[in-house]
Image (cartoon, grey):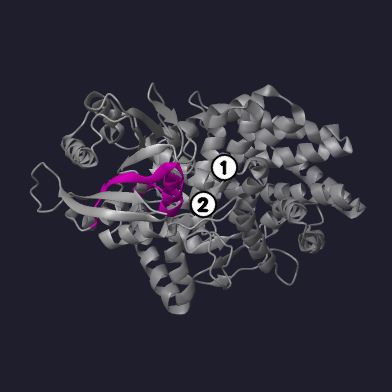
Amino acid sequence: MQKAVSEPAMIGAEISARTNFEGAIVAFRERIYPLYGILRSAITRPGMTFEAFASMRNQRVWNDRIHAEAAGEWLLSMQNGDGGYARKYSLISGRDRSYIETSGYIIPTLLDLGEWLQDERYRRSVHRAGEWLLSVQNRDGSFSEIDSGAPMAFDTGQVLTGLNRLWSETGDVRYRDAAQRAAKWLADSQEADGSWRRVAYNKQPHAYYSRVAAAMLEYAKAQGDEAVADVARRHLEWVLAQQKPNGFFRHASFVEGVPAYLHTVVYILEGLLDAYALEGDSRYLEAVLKNAGQLLKRQNREEKILCSQYDEDFGCANPQKCMTGLAQWAGISLRLARLTSDEKWNEAADVTIFYLKPKQLFAEGVLRGALPASVPFWGRYGAFDFVNWGNKFFIDALILRREREPSSLCEQECFVAHAFSFAPAEVAGEELGAMERLYLEKIDECVQKKGWQKKKIRFLDLGCGRGRFIEALKTRYPAWEIVGVDPVFEGENVRRGSAYAIPFKEGYFDAVLTIEVLQHTYLDDALAEIRRVLKKNGTLLIGERNPVSGLGLLKPFFELNGKWMYAWDDPFRERWYYAGGWKKRLAEKHIYAEHVETLEHPLPSRIPRMNRYYWIKGLKSE
């Protein structure tokens, strides 16, 4: 999608204010429109609005196939009577009319999805869309933007993508001829410097028209049209010339002077990567890696999940989330993983997809399977809209991951490990703080009651971090075999492993210790794995946060304001359980909670009961 999708909501993001007065008007509209939209949508579509709110904090995920199928079903449901796919469903205005541009590039996605799901409905759907696109092509070969009615290079290029695929799939010469006319019009409309301006959005050059050039190259390769190929290469040369030394591309935005959305930034990368696949020109791949490498640094060091908008120094200009851009980023990362054999790109994609999945609506109704354009759903990009191209790119990413889809447990653990990289150093530090020393006292009490002081027992510290408890316990109890397992850290006494897949045989340990670890897991799965490695009558020692505390009350507010390890919209957030909840969950896994004790933090606090904890001793039962 090459431009804003909800015009009133996007005024602040799409119009560069040139006077203080205009700036004040923009700021006013940016603040007032979301309030207006929430009130109106809550009144006119209360059920959908509730689901949109719920999806932002949802943490339920399914396997990739279920999410892809739901996304595809929604696109099928959004196909209008004329054969085109509705641009969006808006909580304010409802279902939109068919959108030429994205109907074009949705075609390859649905054909690929239909092949994956073995569902002929997708093929029939794209054939209807193809017939509609043939009917709306202008005489000169161009395709128009539906709001202004003006022929547009980007719209034409994206339809060309669909025509290329339909010609390849069907052999129907009508698609070949339509593609030829579209490619010729694009060639004739290009500026002398290789950009498009006269037929570009806002009559400004855009680097994300690399996708237009890639579609032209695909056509030229299939038809042997070297003249069209030369025009496409000329534009790609112009795009490469726009890359700054830091990797960012000039003219990446919808409107000059406005920070680019992640959506258009990744558009540029998609076009260049498609061109690389067709041409093999290493400069295209190098440019992609230069830009994507900066985004990867942002994801791994600054934002956890990429921002909605970036300035030309890769600074976050809008901390909201552009869901379409995130889906595209996941797809680009997966493609780069294949090209470079570097696992860091797969990890970036997995974290991003895990963020996207729970935002997809699954309640029965018009929006089942749809993704909001932004999180929050009143965000600048497509406020209150569920746009068809968001689903398209989400499906593309899931299809790319088919061969190496991680389990939901691996997805969750990968995300938690990613979140821990943003946590304060003391969270996984090597030094024992006041609370850790109190936990040690409780361990000592248990040891004395069990008579384990000089016995040769096997003791596991699960989620041990760098092993700070291991060193203290080895000093106290040298006869013990003490090992740690952690998903991130590895060392002399620490093995890489998971709470869901502990790398030891069944019944190996006399005792398992987890200190503020289980709150970061899917508890039932973690407890089942702990029970597996415990001996008969083995002991489970748990130290966890107590929600009946000042911090328990404040945690949601810290999450909302970005002052916590997990953000309010993260796909997983740590879970604090009450005493009754612990007893129940342990009993369900045949672990008897023989002792549950509330601990106060040893250090004084100005707020009474600010930090409180549980100390739990469980016994594996048959």
Residue found 51% across the figure and 59% down from its top: 372
List the residue tagged with mark 2: 356
Q: Could you classify mark 2 by the number of other residues whose Cα lies within 10 Å: few (under 14), some (14-19), or many (20 or more)? A: many
List the residue tagged with mark 1: 330
Residue found 70% across the figure and 54% down from its top: 106
Q: Could you classify mark 1 by the number of other residues whose Cα lies within 10 Å: few (under 14), some (14-19), or many (20 or more)? A: many
Name the foreground residue: 604 vs 467. Answer: 467
Residues shaded magenta: 519-547
| Residue 438 marker | none
| Quadrant housing residue 434 | top left
| Quadrant housing residue 586 | bottom left
Residue found 70% across the figure and 49% down from its top: 158
Relative placement, left or right, of 192 versus 545 is right
**Residue 252 lies in the magenta-colored region:** no
Query: Do the residues under discs 2 and 1 have CB atoms within 8 angstroms?
Result: yes
Q: Quadrant of the C terminus?
A: bottom left
| Residue type at the position of mark 2 | Leu
